[in-house]
Image (cartoon, helix red, strand yellow):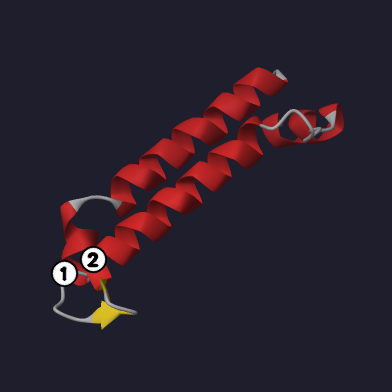
C-alpha cells in the first residue's frame, strides 16, 4: 500500500466522521436554549467541529508527516 493510499483512507474516514458529527441526531443533542459566553450551544458545537475537522485535514495532508514503510507493510498484513 502506498503512502497516498494510506492518506486517502484517512481522509475518507475523516469525511465520514464529519458527516456523522454534523448530521441530525448529533446536532439535536446540542440544540438547546443554553449559551456559552453569549454564543448559542448549537453554533458553538458546529464551529468547534468545523475547526477540528480542518485541523485534522491539515495534519493528515501535511508533508512533514512521514509514515514508515515498515508500518504500512505491517498494517496490510
Q: In the image, which disc is placed on residue 13?
A: none
**In the structure shown, which secondary structural element does the residue marked by tag 1 occupy?**
loop
> For mark 1, does the 10 Å Cα neighbourhood hold few (<14), some (14 to 19), or many (20 or more) residues?
few
* Dot 2 and dot 1 residues touching (CB under 8 Å): yes
Decide if residue 45 is on the left or right side of residue 68. left
Instruction: Name which quarter of the figure residue 69 lies in.
Output: top right
**In the structure shown, which secondary structural element does the residue marked by tag 2 occupy?**
helix
Cα–Cα span, label 2 and label 1: 5 Å
**Residue at horizontal 31 percent and vertical 57 percent from the top:** 46
Instruction: Name which quarter of the figure residue 76 lies in.
Output: top right
Upstream in the sequence, badge 2 or badge 1?
1
Front-most of residues 21 and 43: 43
Q: Which residue is mark 2?
A: 42
Q: In the image, which disc is placed on residue 31?
A: 1
Relative to 70, does residue 29 appear above or below in the rendering?
A: below
Image coordinates for residue 52, horizontal then vertical, percent:
49, 53
Image coordinates for residue 3, horizontal then vertical, percent:
71, 22
Which quadrant, please, contains the C terminus? top right
Amino acid at each position: 500500500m502506498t503512502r497516498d493510499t494510506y492518506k486517502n483512507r484517512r481522509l475518507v474516514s475523516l469525511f465520514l466522521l464529519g458527516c456523522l458529527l454534523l448530521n441530525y441526531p448529533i446536532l439535536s443533542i446540542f440544540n438547546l436554549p443554553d449559551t456559552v459566553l453569549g454564543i448559542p450551544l448549537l453554533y458553538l458545537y458546529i464551529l468547534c467541529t468545523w475547526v477540528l475537522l480542518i485541523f485534522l485535514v491539515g495534519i493528515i495532508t501535511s508533508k512533514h508527516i512521514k509514515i514508515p514503510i515498515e508500518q504500512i507493510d505491517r498494517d496490510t498484513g
